[in-house]
Image (cartoon, rainbow, N blue to C red):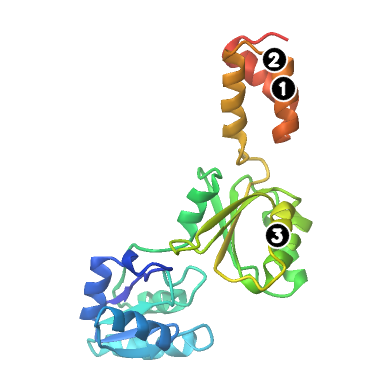
Amino acid sequence: MPLVIVPTPIGNLEDITLRALRELRAADVIACEDTRRTLRLLNHFDIKKELLSCHEHNERRRVDTICALLAEGKRVALVSDAGTPGLSDPGAAAAREAAARGFEVDVLPGANALLPALLLSGASMESFFFAGFLKGKSGEKRKKLEEISQLPDTLVFYVAPHRLTEELAFIASVLGDRRAALVREISKVHQETIRGTLLGICDTMPQEKIRGEFVCVVEGAEGKTMEEASWREEAAAMAQSGERTKNIAAALAEKYGVQRNAVKRFIIENFNGEA
């Protein structure tokens, strides 16, 4: 029998799939990050199953237990507290080791915070780098950020609420005050997207205790910025209205921080603009 990786909702229980429910009901054992949270999910859908805790502190030990269950012909479902196991959550080691030992591993498509945050951010999705949570001491974090600082890809970070502003400021100290978007509470009642620069977003955060799950999307070093589409659309509209190229370039440079020559070149190439 296979080890089945089952994504669970990241906020709204209606986001669970029919296939996920079928697999949870079919499982002999459900390996889960927090038995209490998984029990609440199962109770909501009236599912009664044996639970096996499998979290970041015991996952490597639990691998042997999971593989032993699979060897006995048991069907094991693996879930995390929310989203897809293995994506900044426990699960990757269990799936990897089960496959290495010759057991069948299946993965269901489903909920995660990464892709919705990218879409909500307005950032380029042509290519992106998922950095997850920055771990370790400040020196280790800085080294990681320096390694990815020159990537043209959109960067995606998961950020804990209790260190939100500190983390955004630290990212800005290494990458520069880049355009970014902060997406919180995806699929929940208080879902919100805040766009600006890393430090600008920090300034908008309340001083009181911050709650929620956060994804920070940061523009790449050389790729399209989040507002490139916006200034191009505005430049096109102004050019078509007959506004002079130099006036358009000056206005958009001030509004978006784009180079005047880039605006002029865009207008000349697309609208035969004149100074």
* SS state under label 1: helix
Kindly identify which residue carries mark 3: 145
* Residue at x-position 49% and y-position 74%: 89
Residue 134 image position (x, y, % from top left) = 65, 68
Left or right of residue 264, residue 240 in this image: left
Of the pair 44 and 126, the residue shown nearer to us: 44
Q: Would you say the residues marked 3 and 2 are in contact, meaning their CB atoms lie under 8 Å apart?
A: no
- Specify the amino acid type for callout 2: Thr
* SS state under label 2: helix
Of the pair 24 and 122, the residue shown nearer to us: 122
Residue 86 image position (x, y, % from top left) = 46, 71
- Of circles 1 and 3, which is in front? 1
Residue 225 image position (x, y, % from top left) = 63, 40
**Residue 62 at least partly seen:** yes
Left or right of residue 26, residue 219 in this image: right
Left or right of residue 138, residue 185 in this image: left
Q: Quadrant of the C terminus?
A: top right
- Specify the amino acid type for callout 3: Leu
Locate residue 111: give its quadrant.
bottom left
Q: CA distance from mark 3 to mark 2?
A: 39 Å
Q: Would you say the residues marked 2 and 1 are in contact, meaning their CB atoms lie under 8 Å apart?
A: yes
Residue 213 image position (x, y, % from top left) = 54, 68
Kindly identify which residue carries mark 2: 245
- Residue 1 drawn above or below residue 263: below
- Residue 266 drawn above or below residue 205: above
Q: CA distance from mark 2 to mark 1?
A: 6 Å
Q: Would you say the residues marked 1 and 3 are in contact, meaning their CB atoms lie under 8 Å apart?
A: no
* SS state under label 3: helix
Kindly identify which residue carries mark 1: 249
Q: Earlier in the sequence, mark 3 or mark 2?
A: 3
**Of the numbered discs in the image, which one, if any, rests on residue 133?**
none
* Residue at x-position 59% and y-position 71%: 211
